[in-house]
Amino acid sequence: MSNIASALRKMAQRQPGATALHVPLPRSVTGEPRYRHVSYRQLDEDSERIALGLLRLGLRKGSRAAVLVKPGADLFALTFALFKAGAVPVLVDPGIGPRRMGACLAEAEPEAFLGIPAAHLARLALGWAPSARLKITVGPFAPTGGVTLDEVRASGMTASSQLPAVNEGDTAAILFTSGSTGAPKGAVYTHGNFAAQIELLRRTFQIEPGEVDLPTFPLFALFDPALGMSTVLPRMDATRPALVDPREILEPIQRLRVTNLFGSPALLNRVGRSPEALGARLPSLRRVFSAGAPVPPATLERFSRLLGPEAQIFTPYGATESLPVAVIGSREVLGETAEATRAGAGICVGSVVEGVEVEIIRISDLPIERWSDELRVAPGEIGEFVVRGPQVTGSYFRRPEATALAKIRGPQGEVMHRMGDVGYRDEKGRLWFCGRKSQRVETAQGTLFTDPCEGIFNAHPEVFRSALVGVQRRGELRAELCIELEVAARGASHERLRRELLELASRHPITRGIEAIHVHPGFPVDIRHNSKIFREQLAVWASTR
């Protein structure tokens, strides 16, 4: 498909009356959940009206438009309208913070700013996006001037213009994600990248039109209309999945017979541990996806108890710049690889998906301009993952230095993406993740990688999670460990626990050099999934202990 929005039109023709969106309404007086239902035909026609209205207001093919809209029917209609108009939505992680939001918008220089009233007030107060000449408010009135989305719709109903032709190589969107390290960068997606992602997801997981999805990360929800799945929008703060009300996840799954769930590791942990999950069963679920950070085996085990015998939890491996890359299911993790993780093997992220290739190259922090077979490491050796495939994005927006560090020109001229993750391939061809390249700890005794070391300590029943960090002590970089305790263990003796963990470390060659263990009250984690650990911040904290 050339324009990714054509996937929505195709589904609207195939199943026009089927529900595309279940939009939550305030609960009834008796506490019952209520929803507004939007059909595929309604979503397709609404996005068409908005697209024509945007063109009438002067938006053009290739125009960048910042989108700061809460998850809901308007976000879906607006995003697909921008695709249809050939414009480029600029999407920034929710909750990224005012300063970083301003920096992302300054970098993107959008010509249009589409947001809820609060976003427009912030734009005015903080000087966001002065480049935006077109200001559209998603709400009943425009507090800072411009027009409302309803006025755009009305304009589109009488427009006579035609939608522009869009090619698969044209830019479709710029996605700024918080990631786990460094300042947010805008990944440039083409329509071809999106189409390839959708096809890879459909084929890898046998997703069928007519399924029902509960996506708890807004960006992933936008795939649903193209896949033919009905979207159930959850009642939750998308920027705080670790604080979700478990009832708001379990209840819609049971009532609306949800077949597909996406939840970050923090969300699955929260729901799986909750009193509401005791004795609960979710027989309609065919599959659960969890991504954004490694999922602890204990979390997989707890949540798996809610599922039917045929369902399992998949942990697809990838990044904003390349997704999916590899996948593994909870049965394989719990039945085989978890034990190796506890022994220091790293985290198995599974087999590479069909249609994608992964190379493993020598670890380097320098740019690599062109591919060479000499870059490969020996079988079983830890190196950096490099991905080749149709879903791989070609660049970062206006970041030539970052692009040079992350991209390699392949032998056929294609773009290969350096994941920034290190790991190895086992004898079965599966990938094992050993951590972020930037978070490796290079000591005088050798290099330590985060996830193999942390897997050993995470096996202790009182440890919720751990983080390997490098700390300068007397002119030498030392490998030290920060731990966050399970809630039930927070009154325990730290000295006893340190002794037990050091004894555990002494049993494994890769952790014998760790002599300092620090108990932290609560790890700093990423905005998007509340799961990726900011080890750089922990290293600064540990240096003061």
Image: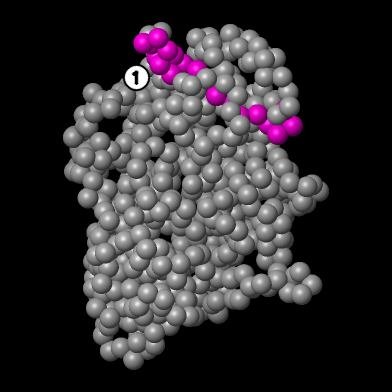
In the shown orientation, is residue 376 left or right of residue 462? left
Residue neighbourhood size for the residue with mark 1, other residues' Cα within 10 Å, grouped as few (<14), some (14–19), many (≥20) = few
The outermost residue toward the right is 279
Q: Which quarter of the figure has residue 322? A: top left
In the shown orientation, is residue 148 left or right of residue 2? right
Q: Residue at x 42, y 57 (%)?
A: 198
Front-most of residues 507 and 427: 507
- Report if residue 495 lies within the magenta region: no
Residue 210 percent coordinates (x, y): 57, 67
- Report if residue 481 lies within the magenta region: yes
Q: Residue at x 41, y 67 (%)?
A: 121
Location of residue 471 with respect to 160 vertically, above or below: above
Tag 1, which secondary structure? loop
Location of residue 503 with respect to 416 vertically, above or below: above
Q: Quadrant of the N terminus?
A: bottom left
Q: Which quarter of the figure has residue 408? A: top left
Residue 58 percent coordinates (x, y): 24, 78
Mainly helix, strand or loop, the magenta region?
strand
Q: Residue at x 66, y 72 (%)?
A: 26
Q: Magenta residues, as a range? A: 471-489
In the shown orientation, is residue 463 left or right of residue 394? right
State whether residue 216 appears in this view. Answer: yes
Which residue carries the number 1 mark? 378
State whether residue 332 appears in this view. Answer: no
In the shown orientation, is residue 426 left or right of residue 161? right
- Identity of the amino acid at label 1? Ala
Residue 156 percent coordinates (x, y): 35, 85
Front-most of residues 439 and 321: 439
Q: Residue at x 36, y 80 (%)?
A: 147
Residue 358 percent coordinates (x, y): 36, 35
